[in-house]
Structure formats: C-alpha cells, structure tokens
Image (cartoon, rainbow, N blue to C red):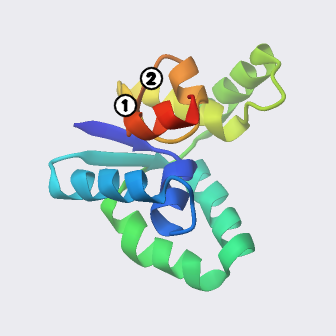
Amino acid sequence: MNIFIDTSAILAVLNSADRFHKPAKEAWQELLTGDAVITTSSYILVETIAVLQHRFGTEAVRLLDSSIIPVMDVFWIDENIHHQALSALLAANRRNLSLVDCTSFEIMRKLGLETAFTFDPHFKEMGFTQLPSSALEEKGG
C-alpha cells in the first residue's frame, strides 16, 4: 500500500494528549510493520515542524527528524506544484482550505495515491480514502 501522510496524522502520532493519538499510533504501527510506502511533502514537513516547535519545543522537532522523517519518502514541492496548488486554492475560494492541503492533493493525484493517513476532512471531500476511518467517523469527517 502506498499512502500519503498529513500533518494532522504526524501530530497525533507524536502527541499523546491528541484526541486521535490512539488510532493514529495504531495506524502508524500497522504502516511500519507492513509493506507501506509512506509519502509526505516538504510543505507538510515545514507545517509540522512549525507546529511542533511552537507547541512542544525543539526536542519534539528532533524526535520528528530522527524517528519519523527517515521512514518516509519526501516529495519536494517545486514551482509547478506550488502554482497548481495555489490556483486550486484560489479557485476553491474557501477560507479554511490551506495551500499545504492543496499541494497534498496535487501530489497525491500526480503520484496516483488514493489513501491519506490524516484526520483532516478535506482529503475525504476531495475524493481520497482516509486512514484510519474509524477515528474519522467518530469525528464526523
């Protein structure tokens, strides 16, 4: 299985106080013990690092860098993907949809990825399958 991982899932895996920590940790363990290729983007990493540093400090960033990033394939956003995502963002004209989300959707389409490890309902709205689905049903997403 090839899967895209979003900021919300990474944060839930790392933060034991996150309301989605338990399903995130279970899903993460399944991904690590299976044959999944876990992909993320450079924009997801920037977003995740900013949140971790702000909420938990540089030690949390160090943990991300040493334990999480090495098991992922990182797709580096180029100018073309950035502009495609920005165009999609502007066309959507939605205040709560982020540029990072739009780059994720572009990457998933480009790579043919259908499943996202995320707790962000925007992925489902865009037609992607979300993992773990049980936690999302509890959230109402």
In this rendering, the answer to whether 90 lies above or below 24 is above
Amino acid carrying label 2: it is Phe
Report the quarter where the N terminus lies: top left
Spatial CA distance of label 1 from label 2 is 6 Å
In this rendering, the answer to whether 92 lies above or below 24 is above
> Visible in this render: residue 31?
yes
Numbered mark located on residue 128 in the image = 2
Q: Quadrant of residue 56?
A: bottom right
Expressed as whole percent of the image width and height from the top left, the position of residue 88 reads: 70, 20
Amino acid carrying label 1: it is Thr
- Circle 1 Cα neighbour tier, 10 Å, few/some/many (<14 / 14–19 / ≥20): many
Q: Secondary structure at mark 1?
A: strand
Q: Is residue 33 left or right of residue 91?
A: left
Numbered mark located on residue 80 in the image = none
The answer to whether marks 1 and 2 mark residues whose Cβ atoms lie closer than 8 Å is yes
Q: Secondary structure at mark 2?
A: loop
Expressed as whole percent of the image width and height from the top left, the position of residue 122 reads: 60, 28
Residue drawn at x 50%, y 52% as measured from the top left = 20
Mark 1 / mark 2, whichever is N-terminal: 1
Numbered mark located on residue 115 in the image = 1
Q: Quadrant of residue 101?
A: top right
Residue drawn at x 60%, y 34% as measured from the top left = 103
* Residue furthest bottom in the image: 59
Expressed as whole percent of the image width and height from the top left, the position of residue 73 reads: 36, 52
> Visible in this render: residue 75?
no
Q: Is residue 30 left or right of residue 82?
A: left
Residue drawn at x 65%, y 40% as measured from the top left = 100
In this rendering, the answer to whether 32 lies above or below 43 is below
